[in-house]
Amino acid sequence: MSIPIRTGSRAPTSSARSAGDRIFRVLSLGVAGMILLIVAGIFAQLALGSAEAFALFGLGFLTGQTWDVSMLVFGALPFIAGTVATSVLAMLLAVPLGVATAVFLSEIAPRRLAIPMTLLVELIAAIPSVVIGLWGVMILGAFLRDGVEVPVVGAFGELPFLGSAASGSDLLAASLLLALMITPTIVAITREVLSTIPQSHREAFLGLGATRWETIRAVVLPQARTGIIGASLLALGRAMGETMAVTMTIGNADRLPSGLFDPAQTIASKLATSWGEASDGVERSSLIALGLVLLFLALALVLATRLLARGSLRRSGIGR
Amino acid sequence: MPETTARAKEVTAEPDLEEIEVRELIRVIPAHHARANDPEAGDLPGAMNLDAVSAWYGAFRAVRDVSMAIPSRQVTAMIGPSGCGKSTLIRTLNRMHEVIPGSRVGGRVELDGQDIYGSTVDPVRVRRVVGMVFQRPNPFPTMSIFDNVAAGVKLAGPRPDRPVAEIVEHSLRRAALWDEVKDKLASRAVALSGGQQQRLCIARALAVEPEVLLMDEPCSALDPIATAKIEDLVRELRDSVTIVIVTHNLQQAARISDQTAFFFVDEARSGHLVEIGPTSAIFVAPREQLTQDYVSGRFG
């Protein structure tokens, strides 16, 4: 059914306006299409570039433990392991810390304290990662080596899950640094989510004779669950992809680490350290294959976020 | 049902105070106001007494020097124009006002003779005895119907003499909701209609067996039929719990309350008590001209 809006004296302006509308539509379609093209291009380039490596090693590339340039044997497992280990460790530290901080800032702290503290937390997010990396090498790494790792290894020898290198440039240092870097993300998003929970829900529970802590646990946190999951996955994405600070502190050893005190390598840090001097051919192709693996890891994460968010929205009845 | 429909019609007229006629109000005031003069009522628990109560938000004084008595097991209605501090005042009665940052309460609020703002009094305990129902139905969205009602019971810890399920059923029956939800206790509370949600919130508040139930415009978000149900409920609950209800609806106050307190704002926008008395007196023969003008719909 057509509506006669173009009749009468307004017809000329109206057609000029609709021309503008058309131009805008073509433009926005073009930009949106470009995004698709770019993503597809990245995928194609990575797939093409890594073809040689996958042709040579097959899926064994993913499980190969050796990365040897002179023998031309390349396996991704040490880097996958390094990426997963640092990210998971960082998450284990940052999620409780970040959620607790957000709860404190939005539920407990008086405004006078909450405002400057929020600003401070956001400032941490603004520190360039190379600066955090510098701090990690000079202060954190040195402290871990002299204050934690050397004494522990000295006292107990080599422990399982710890390893013995104790150089201060290792999984532990990189994970701690990552935790520091992703905490602000978790705090910021969680705080945002908490602020959307109606005050009357808190008051209703307080009105039943609940303490503030009971209210946070039984009413506030359950309602914020979806948001906290989203915040955590976003932070995990950042942890997996973070390059500079990790490269500077992880010790850059291309082998499976045996423990927290062992140097290791993530996919991102491997690419950053090796790309520049990699020879054409299999090595370069293998590095590109690493990039593809990282991309898939990140993609899986985005999908997981969507599924989790949708699932728990449906359960809590908010997304009806 | 015809009675409900008739009442529903009256409620529909709520925003338009000018249509209210004193004559009509007199008609709807039932005989229950005799209770206001019942000398035995004073011996039951749940009596409150306010002495020069003021409430501030930061520097702004929303309530100024309110002194009044809230007799046990009666319905006290608080009426007055928007911004006259009714909602703020009711929130001082269970120490909910102080939850807002920067807020402050002055004066003395007694519950059965004890100052609830005393230095040794835990606000958490006050709120167990003085329950609250809010303007908008606010069931906990992450909980089932059952868990919503059980939430407060579980806070106090399990009671060996009464299983939680029994308390939940009893509370839902008291809130006249049991028959509607007994087959879907495990489903989400937010799936209920607005009126059912509000009765659920009442059941939730009743489950911890308060002596006093504060209702802050409990029908303002409800349709006329749901409103009528809540009003019926208030009349029934009056026998077992003291009720303080804030309402914008004069007819509602006239229908369900034993005594009515009329509040107004002064030049500094502070709310204060103009007059309090048996509901029939406030609506038919108030002492103050201001009250007379308000209840006859001359302004609002």
Image (cartoon, rainbow, N blue to C red):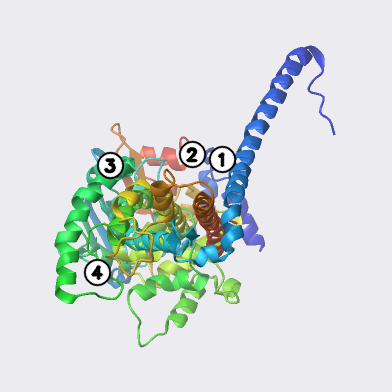
Front-most of B179 and B25?
B179
Q: Residues within 10 Å of mark 4 (few under 14, many from 20)?
A: many
Q: Amino acid at mark 1?
A: Glu
The residue depicted at 34 percent of the width and 73 percent of the height is B155
Separation of residues labelled 3 and 1 (CA atoms): 71 Å
| Chain at tag 3 | A
The residue depicted at 19 percent of the width and 50 percent of the height is A139
Separation of residues labelled 4 and 1 (CA atoms): 86 Å
Q: Residues within 10 Å of mark 1 (few under 14, many from 20)?
A: few
Residue B199: mark: none
| Chain at tag 1 | B
The residue depicted at 45 percent of the width and 59 percent of the height is A229
Front-most of B269 and B196?
B196
Q: Quadrant of the C terminus of chain B?
A: top left
Front-most of A219 and B247?
A219
Q: Residue under label 1, please give it.
A: B19
The residue depicted at 41 percent of the width and 40 percent of the height is B82
Separation of residues labelled 2 and 1 (CA atoms): 7 Å
The x, y position of residue B222, in whole percent, is 55, 54
The lab-note entry on whether marks 2 and 1 share a chain reads: yes
Q: Residue under label 3, please give it.
A: A131
Q: Residue under label 4, please give it.
A: A164
Q: Amino acid at mark 4?
A: Ser
